[in-house]
Image: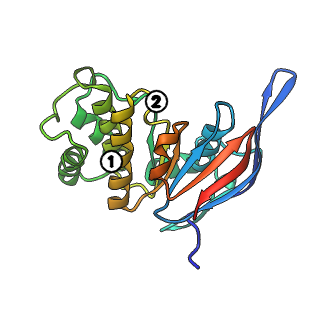
Amino acid sequence: MREPHVIVDNITKTYDLGESKVEALKSVSLSVEKGEFLIVMGPSGSGKSTLVNMIGGIDKPTTGKVKINSTNGSLDLQGLKDKDLTKYRRNLVGFVFQFYSLVPTLTALENVEMIGELVNIPRSVLKKRSMQLLDEVGLKGRYGSFPSQLSGGERQRVALARALVKHPEILIVDEPTGQLDEETGVKMVQLIKDTAKKYGSTVVMVTHDGNLKKFGDRIIYLSSGKIIKEEGQ
C-alpha cells in the first residue's frame, strides 16, 4: 500500500477569544492519497476552512501533526519555522479561494505569471506555460484582459491557472463556487478536477454545495470540529 500524500494526525485547533476558548477542530485524523480529489463538507462553523488551512500551511494546529509526503521528502508542518512554512506554501501548494484574490491592475496573463515569478520559473518558460494554462481553462485570447473586464467565472478560471502555474503537489480549493451561479459553479469544479488530474495535483476542496459531491473521490463531513461521516473509498 502506497504512503499517503497528506496525513492529518489527531489535530486540534483552539482559538482564544478574550476570556473564552473556541475549539475549531477536535481530534481530527485523516489521510489523503496522491492525486486524490477530497471534498470537505459541513455547515458554517464546522471547521472546514480551519482544516484546509492546516494542510495548506496557513495555520498550525494547537496539538497533533500534519505530515506531507512530498516528492522531496517528508515534512512535519507542525515543526517547521515560519520561513519554512512560507517556502512550503510557495513551492508545493496552490490556492484557489472564493473571492479570486486577483491583482486588479494586472492582466489575466500577468496575474498568472506573478506566481511563477515567485518560484523562479525561468522567464522563457513562464510566459508559454501561463498562456497554455489560460488556454486550458478556456481563456484563450483573453491574456490582456483585466479582472474588471472578466465575469466571475472567468476570474475564477484565472485564479485556477495562477494556482497551477507552479505545478503544485497540493491544490487547496476553498468554496470556489460561492460567487458563481449553479451552472458556472459545476463547470468550474469539473475544470478544477480535469486540470488538477493533468498536472498530478492532490486536491482538497471545501464546499457547502451538495451538488458538487459527485466530483469527489471521497467526501468527509465535519460538524462542530469533528469528522462525523465519510463517503467514497
Identified at 26% across, 27% down, the residue is 106
Disc 1 residue type (three-letter): Leu
User: Is 170 placed left or right of 14 in the picture?
Assistant: left
How packed mark 1 is, by other alpha carbons closer than 10 Å (few <14, some 14-19, many 20 or more), is: some
Please provide percent x and percent y for residue 119.
37, 49
Please provide percent x and percent y for residue 231.
61, 56
Q: How is the image coloured?
A: rainbow
Task: Look at the picture and state if 35 lies above or below 26.
Answer: below
Please provide percent x and percent y for residue 146.
23, 25
User: Is 190 placed left or right of 14 in the picture?
Assistant: left
In terms of depth relative to the viewer, which is nearer, 101 or 126?
Answer: 101
The quarter of the rendered structure image containing the N terminus is bottom right
Residue 178: mark: 2
Disc 2 residue type (three-letter): Gly
In terms of depth relative to the viewer, which is nearer, 187 or 57?
Answer: 187
The quarter of the rendered structure image containing the C terminus is bottom right
Identified at 58% across, 68% down, the residue is 4
Identified at 60% across, 38% down, the residue is 49
Secondary structure at numbered mark 2: loop
Residue 191: mark: 1
Q: Earlier in the sequence, mark 1 or mark 2?
A: 2
Q: Residue 14 is drawn in which quadrant?
A: top right
